[in-house]
């Protein structure tokens, strides 16, 4: 049985690391979009909208090939609605945090979510972490903190706004809820369809907020700037649609705790990309932190073979490739 689970565990690891690496591109992409004059909220709206559109096409192709999936139970639709709401709250909270505190401080708050996920899993009994998993969690969190905090310029002073920190923690709590309920909350909903709904909900929410705050006028500015439009299309497809699909697939295959630990590769890759593409400094202590996160992944890989019930839905697809993670 364990041998049969191993391919699903290996796929889950690959999906989590690949998704984290793709999410990391949002830093440079958002910086380039900002340089054209686009505010953060319209950028988030475009990212979610393009991502939902891409996944909508994937869903349509899958339905055309294999037919529509059975209608999910009402309870699963309710859980999916909650996941959609938490996705919107996550985006709004971290957006608000970045407006009040340095990005590094906001990221430190957000990336506490793997610890929150672990705590919830242990309390609820959804996952029983091994000693190796807990060691990997501590090592990854410490490495992430060193990577992110190592980029702060102490000489410039650090303004700690309690509201900004609180918003970052709200974002972390939202991510914790999303990861926890997405493991088994809507198992009959294929991953591509679920993420299309979730990203679509974020798009609608951002547009509504943009209308209220007067930023909606920026939603159309990309059509007159080919470079900006290209940035937004890449952000929506390879910075939202594909990695979000991978993220949900990993959660279903290896559980929220392991996925959360592996997703801490995102700040490591983001810092590296910033050094290469944006010419930001990469300090030796940040390299040390990155080694810590890598070490956590190795520990996790050696001590895990997949959850007994880790699987994708029966008719699930990942970008058109059928995947069966059943034990």
Image (spheres, rainbow, N blue to C red):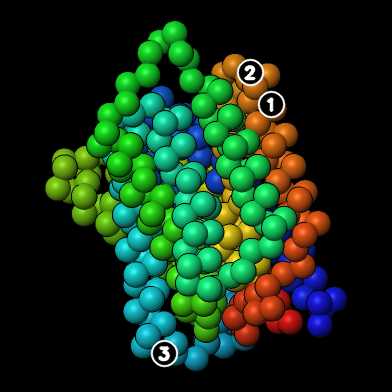
Decide: few, some or many residues near mark 2? Use Cα within 10 Å; few <14, some 14-19, many ≥20.
few
Q: As displayed, is residue 198 above or below residue 161?
A: below
In the image: residue 89, left or right of residue 181: left
Picture quadrant of residue 166: top left
Task: Tell me residue 41's x, y (percent).
Answer: 31, 42
Q: Which residue is denoted by mark 2 in the rendering? A: 283
Residue visible at 61% across and 45% down in the picture: 138
Question: Disc 1 versus disc 3: distance between alpha carbons?
Answer: 47 Å
Residue visible at 65% across and 22% down in the picture: 285
Q: Which residue is denoted by mark 3 in the rendering? A: 73
- In which quadrant of the rendered image does the N terminus lie? bottom right
Q: Earlier in the sequence, mark 2 or mark 3?
A: 3
- In which quadrant of the rendered image does the C terminus lie? bottom right
Which callout, 2 or 3, points to the residue nearer the camera? Answer: 2
Mark 2–mark 1 contact, CB under 8 Å? Answer: yes
Pick whichever, 130 or 13, lies toward us.
130
Pick whichever, 26 or 267, lies toward us.
267
Mark 2–mark 3 contact, CB under 8 Å? Answer: no
């Amino acid at each position: 049985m364990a041998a049969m689970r191993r391919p699903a565990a290996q796929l889950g690891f690959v999906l989590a690391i690949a998704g984290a690496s793709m999410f990391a591109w949002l830093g440079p992409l958002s910086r380039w979009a900002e340089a054209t004059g686009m505010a953060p909220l319209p950028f988030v709206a475009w990212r979610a909208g393009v991502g939902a559109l891409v996944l909508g096409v994937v869903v349509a192709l899958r339905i055309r090939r294999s037919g529509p999936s059975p209608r999910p139970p009402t309870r699963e639709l309710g859980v999916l609605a909650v996941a959609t709401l938490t996705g919107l709250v996550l985006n709004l909270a971290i957006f608000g945090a970045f407006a009040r505190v340095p990005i590094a401080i906001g990221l430190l708050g957000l990336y506490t979510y793997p610890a929150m996920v672990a705590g919830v899993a242990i309390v609820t009994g959804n996952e029983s972490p091994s000693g190796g998993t807990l060691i990997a969690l501590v090592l990854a969190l410490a490495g992430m903190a060193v990577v992110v905090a190592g980029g702060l310029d102490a000489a410039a002073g650090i303004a700690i706004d309690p509201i900004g920190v609180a918003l970052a923690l709200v974002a972390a709590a939202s991510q914790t809820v999303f990861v926890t309920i997405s493991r088994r909350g809507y198992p009959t909903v294929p991953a591509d369809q679920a993420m299309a709904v979730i990203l679509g909900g974020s798009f609608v929410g951002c547009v509504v907020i943009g209308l209220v705050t007067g930023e909606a006028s920026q939603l159309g500015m990309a059509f007159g700037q080919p470079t900006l439009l290209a940035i937004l299309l890449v952000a929506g497809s390879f910075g939202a649609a594909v990695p979000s699909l991978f993220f949900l697939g990993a959660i279903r295959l290896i559980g929220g705790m392991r996925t959360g630990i592996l997703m801490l590769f995102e700040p490591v890759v983001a810092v590296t990309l910033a050094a290469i593409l944006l010419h930001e400094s990469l300090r030796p202590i940040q390299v040390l932190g990155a080694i810590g996160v890598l070490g956590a992944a190795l520990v996790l890989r050696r001590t895990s073979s997949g959850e007994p019930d880790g699987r994708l839905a029966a008719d699930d697809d990942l970008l058109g490739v059928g995947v069966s993670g059943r034990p």
